[in-house]
């Protein structure tokens, strides 16, 4: 027998998943217990609006679990993890190339292509001028004139 899911519940689950990530960001940024508890109250109030008892119970359980993980600092911000991993890849390069890699990773320069096209190409160009060359002025004594 096929189980039907309430579209309203599905929307709420998406909302709850977003809130879980937000709670992780709050925990990572040093949010206090009051902020986390306020987020939980908002989530649980939304869960109580679900008409199907089993779905409502699941939603409340997930909200409570997210609150507990946020309070323990166990939720992580997915974007922060992605950026940290991307920057860590630059460490495999020679030391002279690592800074340019970090700049490309942070979005400096030009980005073209896409995953569907086979890859994303990131290019960062830095124009460096050679050190200034000092030209020495050489004074050449003039030849004696015949009238002296």
Image: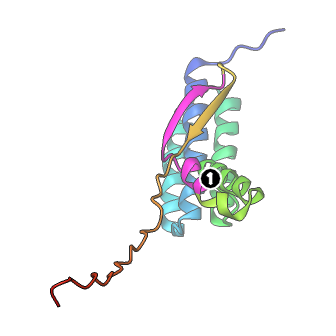
Q: Residue at x 20, y 83 (%)?
A: 146
Q: Residue at x 55, y 22 (%)?
A: 8
Magenta stretch, residue numbers: 100-115
- Which quadrant does the N terminus fall into? top right
Q: Position of residue 100 (x, y in %)?
A: 58, 55
Residue 53 relative to residue 38: left or right: right
> Element type at marker 1?
helix
Which residue was labeled with disc 1?
Answer: 101
Front-lying residue, 74 or 146: 146
Residue 56 visible in this rendered orientation of the protein: yes
86 is higher (above) or lower (below) than 49: below
Q: Is residue 12 magenta?
A: no
Q: Is residue 113 magenta?
A: yes
Residue 119 relative to residue 31: left or right: right
Quarter-of-image position of residue 90 = bottom right
- Which quadrant does the C terminus fall into? bottom left
Q: Position of residue 99 (x, y in %)?
A: 60, 60
Residue 16 visible in this rendered orientation of the protein: no
């Amino acid at each position: 027998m096929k189980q039907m899911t309430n579209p309203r519940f599905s929307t709420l689950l998406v909302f709850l998943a977003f809130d879980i990530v937000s709670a992780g960001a709050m925990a990572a940024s040093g949010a206090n217990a009051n902020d986390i508890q306020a987020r939980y109250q908002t989530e649980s109030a939304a869960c109580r609006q679900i008409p199907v008892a089993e779905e409502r119970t699941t939603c409340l359980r997930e909200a409570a679990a997210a609150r507990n993980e946020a309070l323990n600092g166990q939720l992580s911000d997915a974007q922060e993890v992605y950026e940290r991993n991307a920057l860590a890849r630059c460490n495999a390069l020679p030391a002279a190339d690592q800074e340019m890699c970090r700049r490309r990773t942070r979005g400096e320069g030009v980005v073209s292509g896409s995953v569907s096209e086979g890859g994303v190409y990131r290019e960062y160009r830095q124009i460096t001028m050679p050190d200034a060359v000092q030209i020495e002025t050489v004074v050449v004594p003039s030849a004696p004139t015949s009238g002296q």
